Amino acid sequence: MDIVITNHAEERAKERLGWNRHAIERMADKAYEEGISHAEANPKIRKYFDKLFLMKHQANNVRIYGQVVYLFSNNRLMTLFIIPKNIEKSIKKQ
């Protein structure tokens, strides 16, 4: 699937992760296809996803891939950020 990277997502990826445009596109594709989704998540991560959905009303698809949370609206990457430490521990257990 072709992922559209919003300007906001590109700016956040550069600011928070130091990624260039090519890296953002590559990682967004991987996250969308291979990332942990709400349905695949354990209860603690699922609760975290629910919180994100309530905070970011435009996002309808949250994925975790590696150490990064990706918020998508359909096929558009809206924003991304590094996983909080307390959630990171739950992902390693999964």
Image: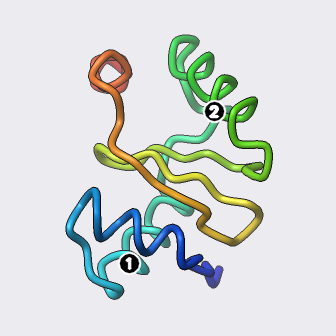
Q: Quadrant of the C terminus?
A: top left
Query: Which residue lies at the image location 69% right of the left edge and 33% below the top edge?
Result: 55
Relative image position of residue 33 (x, y in whole percent): 54, 62
Mark 1 lies on residue: 26
Query: Which residue lies at the image location 60% right of the left edge and 41% below the top edge?
Result: 37
The circle on residue 52 is: 2
Q: Secondary structure at mark 2?
A: helix
31 and 49: which is toward the camera: 49
Q: Is residue 14 above or below residue 40?
A: below
Side of 11 relative to 88 (left or right): right
Q: How many marks?
A: 2
Query: Which residue lies at the image location 34% right of the left edge and 27% below the top edge?
Result: 84
Relative image position of residue 40 (x, y in whole percent): 59, 32
Q: Secondary structure at mark 1?
A: helix
Q: Is residue 4 above or below residue 81?
A: below
Say which amino acid is labelled 2. Leu
Side of 19 relative to 11 (left or right): left
Say which amino acid is labelled 1. Arg
Distance (Cα) linking label 2 and label 1: 23 Å
Q: Earlier in the sequence, mark 2 or mark 1?
A: 1
Q: Quadrant of the N terminus?
A: bottom right
Q: Characterize the local packing of mark 2: few (<14), some (14-19) or many (20 or more) Cα atoms within 10 angstroms.
A: some
